[in-house]
Image (cartoon, rainbow, N blue to C red):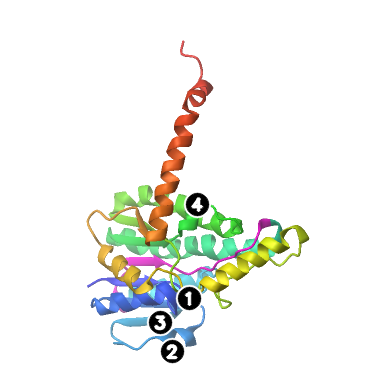
Amino acid sequence: MKTWFITGASRGIGFEIAQAALAAGDNVVATARNLDKLVEAFSGDPERLAFAQLDVQNPEQAETASALAKEQFGGIDVLVNNAGFGQLGHFETISSDAIAHQFSTNVFGLMQVTRALMPLMREQRRGHIFNLSSIGGTIGFDGAAIYCATKFAVEGFSESLALELGRFGIQVTIVEPGFFRTDFLDGSSVRYGDINIPDYTEAAAEQREQYGAYSHAQLGDPKKLAQWIVDVAGAENAPLRLIAGSDALQMSRDLLHNRHEELEGWANRSVTTDHEVA
């Protein structure tokens, strides 16, 4: 039996991961900003399910939730950093405050929670951290510069963290979903630029229309992704990355192909920047 700590667990992928873990017979500490909505979302064995109010931007709440997990279940085996939202819109149309809020949630909040739980995992000399990134953490999208920037940051942080924590028996896996059928693209989650710049008006309207039509019609099934994560948790040699969804898989293949071609196309110039060998 494992104990899971899941942020943003009141809906979407976080909720489905919690349900899959409970179905597997594991313990779950489910967290979210709104405790009432979190409790409403679940029905299950209270002996294996604990709730904690957690705004990932609040380090004190992260420490309190970590202490609750240790008190009730003795420790944490799996941390799922799922909480976040999408700040879409073209860079110039997004205010500095909105940019700061996006990074505070998607990047710094993820780091705060990880910092709060790492001592438990180090003490145990075991653990598995799943950081929810996105295909937008490997590929830039038009009209998503800030969101992609946060997910690229999660990727770099996670790669380095995996090297730092491997010596303690702690694994790190980056989850890179494509488009999954959650609330991500509807008005309860996604945000767009708040600065009106006429040069972007047409492109911004097209983006809203496209994503609005795609909302709740995405190809990815969050229940299947959740089950995959539960299956991978604790595996002896878990992958550094889980590329989730046929759309994300194809985009990743295209990215690697294009990068390889570009790398080799400029390789002869790349080596000319070395010092001359004496």
Q: CA distance from mark 2 to mark 1?
A: 22 Å
Q: Which residue is mark 3?
A: 51
Point 61% across, 70% down: residue: 209
Residue 110: where, in percent of width, then height? 48, 63
Check residue 6 in the rendering and tell me which mark sits there, or answer none: none
The Cα–Cα distance between marks 4 and 3, rounded to whole angstroms, is: 35 Å
Which of the two discs, 2 and 3, sits closer to the camera?
2
Q: Quadrant of residue 221?
A: bottom left
* First-in-chain label (2 vs 1): 2
Who comes first in sequence, dot 2 or dot 4? 2
Residue 99's place in the image compared with 46, above or below, is above
Q: Label 4 near label 2: C-beta < 8 Å? A: no
| Residue 53 belongs to the span the image colors magenta | no
Q: Which residues are magenta?
A: 72-91
- Name the dominant secondary structure of the magenta segment: loop
Q: Amino acid at mark 2?
A: Glu
Query: As shown in the figure, which amino acid type bears the numbered disc 3?
Result: Phe
State the residue position of label 1. Answer: 216
Type of the residue with mark 1: His
Q: Is residue 161 above or below residue 275?
A: below
Give whichever of 71, 34 is nearer the camera: 34
Q: Secondary structure at mark 3?
A: strand
Closer mark to the observer between disc 1 and disc 4: 1
Whether pointer 2 and pointer 1 mark residues with C-beta atoms closer than 8 Å, the reply is no
- Judging by the rendered image, the residue that carries numbered circle 2 is 40
